[in-house]
Image (spheres, rainbow, N blue to C red):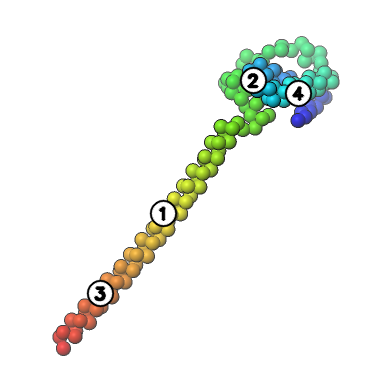
Amino acid sequence: MKIDFNSDDIGECQDAQKLRLLLNELLRHETDDASRDIISSLIRQLESDLKESGFTSIIDSASDTLPANTGNRSLLSRLCDAWRSIAGPSRREMELSRQRKELIERAEHAEASAFDALAETADVGRERDNALERVKQLEEELARLKDR
């Protein structure tokens, strides 16, 4: 995986520094060795890009901690978002997504079955009406035959 920032743009360098700080924080809490290796690799790439930038004096003077007020979202939610953007959805999210798809398929099947049952009910109603009409015709015919 390779992350490349435009070293001529101060905004991108600041974004790279923020991402590095987030990754450092994430690295402190991660226990999986494979994830730690990926995070460490990304941090090395970011540090390399930051050193090559023309803004090293500004970056070196910046605090090496996360800003205290970066919006209403908690640090944990920002870290989770950063991790999700790097690693993708978790196994639990994938399982929930699969279950959601199954439930949607079941609901669609139930809806189709309900419409089929409604159509069948309408057909049975028409057949009943036709049968009642035929019974009425036969009764009238029988009454005429009796009158003769």
Say whether residue 87 is left or right of residue 50. left
Residue type at mark 1 is Ala
Relative placement, left or right, of 89 versus 14 is left
**Which dot marks residue 135?**
3
Report the disc number at residue 114.
1
Marked residue nearer the N-terminal end (4 or 1): 4
User: The C terminus is located in which quarter?
Assistant: bottom left
Q: Earlier in the sequence, mark 1 or mark 2?
A: 2
Crowding at dot 3, Cα within 10 Å, few <14 / some 14-19 / many 20+, comes out as: few
Give how far across and how far down residue 135 sits, in percent. Answer: 25, 74
Residue 136 occupies which quadrant of the picture? bottom left
**Which amino acid does the dot numbered 2 rest on?**
Thr
Residue marked by disc 2:
31
Residue type for callout 4: Ser
Mark whose residue sits in front, 2 or 4: 2
Secondary structure at numbered mark 1: helix
Foreground: 51 or 54? Answer: 51
Q: Residues within 10 Å of mark 2 (few under 14, many from 20)?
A: few
Q: Is residue 88 visible?
A: yes
Q: Label 4: which residue? A: 41
Residue 130's spot in the image, x, y percent?
31, 71
